[in-house]
Amino acid sequence: MTTTNTTGQKLYQYARRRIPGGTQLLSKRPEMFLPDQWPSYYSRAQGAEVWDLDGNRYVDMSYNGIGACVLGHADPEVNAAVHAAVEAGSMSTLNCPEEVELADLMCELHPWAEMVRYARSGGEAVAIAVRIARASTGRYKIAFCGYHGWHDWYLAANLASDHALDGHLLKGLDPNGVPRGLQNSALPFHYNRLDELKDIVEAQPGGIAAIVMEPLRDSPPEAGFLEGVREIADRIGAVLVFDEVTAAFRLNSGGAHLLFGVMPDIAVYAKAISNGFPMAVVLGREPVMQAAQSTFISSTNWTERIGPVAALATIRKHRRENVAEHLIAIGNRVKEGWRVAAEGAHLKVHVSGIAPLGHFEFEYANGQAMRTLFTQMMLERGFLATNAFYATYAHQDSHIDAYLAAVREVFGLVAQAVTTGTIEEELKGPVAHSGFQRLT
């Protein structure tokens, strides 16, 4: 399709003069997708579709609110609940009863837990979990695996005694502004590497406050891995924190850890829990969670009404409609479609990730340029697309049929450009930036 999408780019160029970095979220920067061409801003979004500032309609076959809109953009049921909450008053001197109702629902979904605290974003919720773990144990060092946000406790992993080595653990995450006194307080290990965690524990005579990790990321845990982590936490008296911000409500209604039968001491939820409205839950065992009373964790906006109301509506629809089953089916269709299209075009493409959060990589030296060209060509065909797809309940077979037809065509064109050596020449702008590398 032929479109004009210059308004968003012009606004973004201006925004960079007003907003450091241009956006509030690294993953939404236009340079991460298609520099100088990405629509950048939306006027409205509904279901699986997004309209830019020039009125162009796209099918969102990319991140769908960076994983937040698990039901689809502007789900009518969730929106209706939020509208009612706004009309009734979203903030008051008194507390909203929905926060107690949500606490009961979360503990019903996770029978191992008895108490909750709330926040409004994933990163701050994990920081709360870390604070509670430190207060509960009286220790401060954290062993971690995976990505857990922007706060000081986490970026401290990138501090080194030699400034030249800063950032070598989590490439692309600069620890500028993080106090150097936090050096060696966050100790990383890789997923499925129980030996690395054991080495960390043995090297810390003062003990570990918490083990923070995602129970699931790109692939299931190896046999005995999560059980081994649980055993270590119990043996050394550390708090086991499962960061469920990304994985939760993708494969079931609740935390992914429920599928593996290994229960943490604290689990953290955000993103999909409230379908795009700000909400986060820190859920845990009563003896550990009570430590929140021995420190100071408090914020006015954690008491507003919209977040809990949106979460209640999202979770109830998720359970009633068996949304996870749909996400898995749609996600598997897309992943298989990538494989078939790549084989048909004779492209070397590696497909990975769990079904609802799939992604692929072009296995070439200039793979990033190829990915940029893919995004450019898919945008011209009416799709917001990159090398990842986060499935939503709003995605139907008709969306997938049209998307995969376009993928087959574009993979064929990319393959031709590989053969002729013209990948970079066919780009209408710079190659997309790469994000930080997760320690997984």
Image: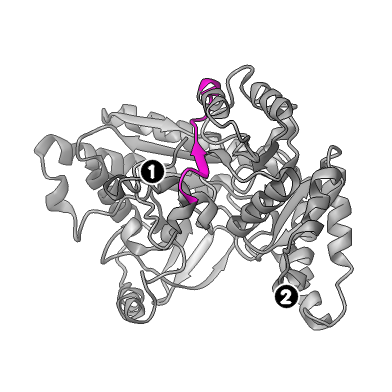
Q: Where is residue 145 in the image (x, y as percent from the top left)?
A: 53, 37
Q: How many marks?
A: 2
Say if 238 sits above or below 294 in the image: above
Identify which residue is drawn at 72% across, 69% down.
Answer: 79
Identify which residue is drawn at 81% across, 47% down.
Answer: 320
**Image quarter hosting the N terminus:** bottom left
Residue placed most toward the observer, 66 or 435: 435
Q: Do the CB atoms of the residues marked 2 and 1 lie less than 8 Å apart?
A: no
> In 3D space, how far apart are the residues under numbered discs 2 and 1 (Cα atoms)?
34 Å
| Residue 57 magenta | no
Mark 1 burial class by Cα count in 10 Å: few <14, some 14-19, many 20+: few
Label 1 belongs to which residue?
437
- Residue extending farthest to the top is 223
Start-end of magenta stretch: 182-195
Indicate left or right for 215 with 49 as reference: right
Residue placed most toward the observer, 378 or 155: 155
Q: Which amino acid does label 2 sit on?
A: Thr
Give the mark nearest the N terminus, 2 or 1: 2
- For residue 300, the mark is 2
Indicate left or right for 83 with 185 as reference: right
Residue 240 visible in image: yes
Residue 149 visible in image: no
Q: Where is residue 47 in the image (x, y as percent from the top left)?
A: 60, 60
Say if 25 sits above or below 211 in the image: below
Q: Which amino acid does label 1 sit on?
A: Gln
Indicate left or right for 412 with 327 as reference: left
Secondary-structure class at tag 2: helix
